[in-house]
Amino acid sequence: MGNRGMEELIPLVNKLQDAFSSIGQSCHLDLPQIAVVGGQSAGKSSVLENFVGRDFLPRGSGIVTRRPLILQLIFSKTEYAEFLHCKSKKFTDFEEVRQEIEAETDRVTGTNKGISPVPINLRVYSPHVLNLTLIDLPGITKVPVGDQPPDIEYQIKDMILQFISRESSLILAVTPANMDLANSDALKMAKEVDPQGLRTIGVITKLDLMDEGTDARDVLENKLLPLRRGYIGVVNRSQKDIEGKKDIRAALAAERKFFLSHPAYRHMADRMGTPHLQKTLNQQLTNHIRESLPTLRSKLQSQLLSLEKEVEEYKNFRPDDPTRKTKALLQMVQQFGVDFEKRIEGSGDQVDTLELSGGARINRIFHERFPFELVKMEFDEKDLRREISYAIKNIHGVRTGLFTPDLAFEAIVKKQVVKLKEPCLKCVDLVIQELINTVRQCTSKLSSYPRLREETERIVTTYIREREGRTKDQILLLIDIEQSYINTNHEDFIGFANAQQRSTQLNKKRAIPNQVIRRGWLTINNISLMKGGSKEYWFVLTAESLSWYKDEEEKEKKYMLPLDNLKIRDVEKGFMSNKHVFAIFNTEQRNVYKDLRQIELACDSQEDVDSWKASFLRAGVYPEKDQAENEDGVQENTFSMDPQLERQVETIRNLVDSYVAIINKSIRDLMPKTIMHLMINNTKAFIHHELLAYLYSSADQTSLMEESADQAQRRDEMLRMYHALKEALNIIGDISTSTVSTPVPPPVDDTWLQNTINHSPTPQRRPTSSVHPPGRPPAVRGPTPGPPLMPVPVGPAASFSAPPIPSRPGPQSVFANNDPFSAPPQIPSRPPRIPPGIPPGVPSRRPPAAPSRPTIIRPAEPSLLD
């Protein structure tokens, strides 16, 4: 016979699981564990068996459960069991399961009562169970026997606490009725991990084995030693019944008969027994499921809302409708143009915070990468002076010149202007690459129609390539224009008179002293492991120095490096490193930092490296030049100049420096303008005004708007998901209406659990009697003879009220529970001749006690007069 309450829950949980499976998610109900805790031979295994509804655990006298048994119940269409230690074998006979548990226990603990904390993991698959975990724990014992260690008590307690400390576990504190409840270790341990009593249920076993004349009525009514969730009494099969193969169905019938026929329990028989325990635990599972529903519902509703807008478009969707295709084509081309313009011009909505894109990257090329390329192209001092001296000598020929020839100046300037072509064309190539990347990013929204996306990318990219030629021609024309006429009357040009007086130090003029050029994080990459290894610092670059600090607060300065005689060189990225590195070194072969000839600075990306290099250029720190040009031994002529020639070279050098600076400034200003006008703005206009016509001429509308298989599948999945979400929400609504949550019982006065260490309260057993005890009136129909009964007052005056009618025990329990001093009860010390609570002088109308029965006081049932 299975657990019928559990079987009623199974369809609900299965509906939820199926609903969530249909939307590709798992339903995490995380049903609670149920652990049985109690003393040795208290009947824990029997309680667990009765809950499952199967007979499969070892039974006997003494310590039988010597290892924790973790029993996982798993819903399945077929019924079988399997152990973790022998997964390959499936057990269909539960008698074999019992034998395997005994054999596995003996294998680890031996056959002489030894214990082990190593659990046995058993899985039971059945169509009659929920996905639950039940834990059968060894009984609490005090004295070691057999092979048990001396600290057996503490070992078992630690083992039990390990399992019952989890917040989602229900604790069944099992205590036999023939044992003093105040000494129950199970209740004491449950109180340690569950002080509020929210997940502890008291279970009283062996009620049929109590001494004759005693019962546990006060305990089961939760009067004597109260628990928040109360106690449930059960009668398990005896060892004789088990050996006689008495099945669980017959045992439950015998249990029911016991409670109905026992005079102390018949009034609460519907709240006793294994079926009620099953019902209570199943209600806890129902409560847990219902508590999980609001979270699941909100999760589903948020998903449903996110799908609503897209599903609305698909509800009346007809893939082959030509009107829909025309409308979609127009909308997509228009959206593509808007997206392209937003990426180039910038927009406040949908800002990418992870990386630069579109216009921001082009801006970086214009103002960081291109200036850096210009400076990299700058002439080497020694080469320039040698070229000037050759030019002067060649112009004078066989004559000795008395004046500085201006033709030498023009020749050198034109040669330097020609060098501008390479960085300018490279700048155009970088911008084109960014434009093509931007087009690809914008066409990602056209992925539903692969042919349309492909044609759009092809047409726009072809147009960009066409504009590339015109743009490069225009830029080369600008450079040729600069070459065609050297304007020595330019307002920024220094002229011959100033050039002769100017010192060479003006060549190295820096920015305003102490001006901060850049701040940011860099990693010093070449500090040895012995000195801490590579470390990240906050760097501040000014016009005069490079400083680094511990952090961006700039309070703890680590070092300040002057920029004099510093240059930059590239460093290859390490094999195991993903950082991009450049180095700073001193041209006079001095240590830059401590004992380092150069410091290697690492960034996360090449773009950051280029940006830092551009900042160093602004501070006057230039890249290193290749050193292979002087290997042919021609540089001796540079140093063999006479003083007059040296003055002429210095003058031409200053003039060239001044005029090239003017050209660089002009080119840096005109390059972005030229590229924007001839390439970027033209591309935007083309997309807005001509792209649609090119698309119509390249292919017919039907082939362009042919939907991809992925898009059709995505649409079908979205519609299926939408309906599955609605179905899941309906199922949750059905479960909410078809199940009922039980409120948590109010707290009770359970201070007795804390006092059990110091003293023991009165035992819970009491004698039974079919005759009413002395001191209470008999059950009488109609008016009671004698003085009229006083009305029942509320509060302190209750001690002077009349006694209740004994045939109605209900009001007694209500008032007894309201008495704050009723737990633990004490044996009254008043004389038995006067009923408690009746003032002296009021005549007692007690019937005489039966002569054959002694006077017995029932302390556990205080009357209304208490």
Image (cartoon, grey):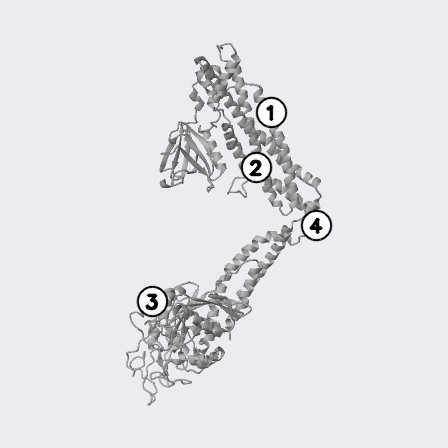
Distance CA(mark 4)–CA(mark 3)? 78 Å
Distance CA(mark 2)–CA(mark 4)? 37 Å
> Which residue has dot 1 on it?
477
Amino acid residing under circle 1:
Leu
Amino acid residing under circle 2:
Glu
Q: Crowdedness of circle 1 by 10 Å Cα count: few (<14), some, many (20+)?
A: few
Distance CA(mark 2)–CA(mark 1)? 24 Å
Q: Quadrant of residue 221?
A: bottom left
Amino acid residing under circle 3:
Tyr
Mark closest to the chain's N terminus, 4 or 1:
4
Q: Position of residue 406 (x, y in %)?
A: 52, 14
> Which residue has dot 4 on it?
321
> Which residue has dot 3 on it?
154
Q: Nearer the viewer, mark 2 or mark 3?
A: 3
Q: Which quarter shows the C terminus?
A: bottom left
Distance CA(mark 2)–CA(mark 3)? 72 Å
343, above or below 158, in the image = above
Q: Position of residue 211 (x, y in %)?
A: 36, 82
Mark closest to the chain's N terminus, 2 or 1:
2
> Which residue has dot 2 on it?
434
